[in-house]
């Protein structure tokens, strides 16, 4: 199996850790909150077919510096990162949840850099005032009590909760991976990201202008961005197809990697045809 090489590259006003593997069509994988590149470990086999570029977004994982200020900033980072790793041709941009917010902004702000879009367990809408207030509250609590509070609050909501999903053989390993990733993110990054996510704009108008194919994937048991979010996106994005994955929650690429990877490869045939 191909294995990732890790680089640290100067990107705008920061340094990003980026994990790359494979060759051919570039596929950028943007992680969710409050995670890092590690959430894409089960996508490594895709490197047999494409060139994977898997960053830790600013402040997360092995990337240094303060956390994000906005989804627009993270989108511009992503494109500067493609430049830094010498990718001039349009890339397939795939993001989960927060990564999906960023991917939407990459497509809106840098359409010439995007060959196709893959939105996973995410939504188009901005936060409601209640959700935003919840993020402010969580940021204050993390400051007082540390990252383990976020892990405790989020992990049960990140994964599918049906008896069948809970009985999956790798369930305990996935929970342990999420725990390790969440508690290793700096408190300041978590707080900055909560504010940046809470301040993101509504993208329902912008995505109607997309001119590239889009694959939408959501876990049937996603409690944070339920299938209805992606069903709405399917109606609004001009060239979109939706896959609802059984027995998966908000972490479809981790919980159902076989189904996810196969769907992605099938979709990529459209891009390379
Ligand atoms: C994520 O998984 O990135 C977060 O659930 C995003 C969010 O809180 O909106």
Image (spheres, rainbow, N blue to C red):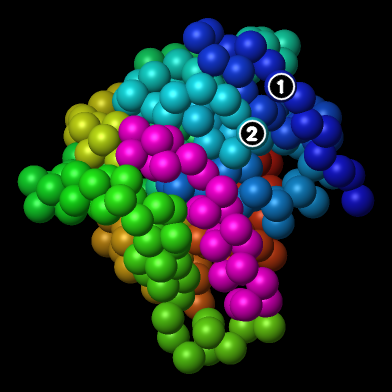
Instruction: Specify the label residue 8 is tagged with.
Output: 1
Give the image quarter of residue 25: top right
Q: Does label 1 point to a residue whose CB lies under 8 Å from ligand 1?
A: no
Image point 34% across, 33% down: which residue? 192
Instruction: Return the mark for residue 35.
Output: none
**Residue found 72% across the figure and 11% down from its top:** 86
Q: What residue sits right under mark 2 in the picture?
A: 62
Please say whether residue 178 is one of the residues in the magenta stretch: yes
In x, y percent, where is residue 30?
54, 37
- Out of 136 and 48, give the one closest to the viewer: 136
Inter-mark Cα distance, 2 to 1: 8 Å
Asked if residue 124 is positioned above or below residue 227 in the image, the reply reads above
Q: Is residue 90 above or below residue 242?
A: above
Q: Earlier in the sequence, mark 2 or mark 1?
A: 1
- The answer to whether one can see residue 154 in this image is no
- Residue drawn where x is 26% and y is 35% of the image: 195
Over which residues does the magenta segment extend? 170-193
- The answer to whether the residue bearing label 2 lies less than 8 angstroms from the nearest atom of ligand 1 is no
Nearest the viewer among 61 and 103 is 61
Quick one: SS at disc 2?
A: loop
Whether 233 is drawn above or below 68: the answer is below
Mark 1: give few (<14), some (14-19) or many (20+) Cα within 10 Å: some
Residues at circles 2 and 1 in contact by the CB criterion of under 8 Å? yes
The image shows residue 200 at horizontal and vertical percentages of 25, 32
């Amino acid at each position: 199996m191909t294995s990732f090489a890790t680089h640290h590259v100067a990107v705008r006003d920061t340094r990003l850790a980026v994990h790359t593997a494979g060759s051919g069509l570039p596929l950028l994988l943007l992680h969710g909150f409050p995670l890092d590149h590690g959430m894409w470990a089960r996508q490594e086999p895709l490197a047999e077919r494409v060139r994977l570029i898997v960053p830790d977004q600013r402040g997360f994982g092995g990337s240094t510096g303060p956390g994000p200020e906005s989804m627009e900033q993270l989108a511009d980072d992503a494109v500067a990162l493609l430049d830094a790793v010498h990718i001039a041709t349009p890339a397939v941009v795939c993001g989960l949840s927060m990564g999906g917010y960023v991917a939407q902004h990459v497509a809106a702000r840098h359409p010439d850099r995007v060959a196709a879009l893959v939105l996973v367990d995410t939504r188009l809408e901005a936060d409601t005032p209640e959700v935003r207030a919840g993020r402010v509250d969580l940021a204050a609590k993390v400051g007082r009590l540390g990252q383990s509070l976020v892990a405790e609050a989020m992990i049960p909501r990140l994964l599918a909760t049906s008896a069948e999903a809970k009985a999956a053989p790798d369930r305990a390993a996935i929970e342990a991976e999420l725990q390790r990733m969440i508690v290793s993110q700096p408190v300041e990054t978590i707080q900055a990201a909560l504010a940046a996510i809470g301040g993101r704009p509504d993208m329902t108008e912008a995505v109607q202008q997309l001119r590239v194919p889009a694959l939408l994937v959501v876990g049937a048991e996603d409690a944070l961005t339920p299938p209805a979010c992606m069903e709405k996106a399917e109606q609004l994005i001009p060239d979109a197809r939706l896959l609802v994955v059984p027995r998966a929650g908000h972490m479809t690429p981790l919980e159902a990697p076989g189904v996810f990877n196969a769907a992605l490869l099938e979709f990529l045939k459209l891009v390379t045809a």
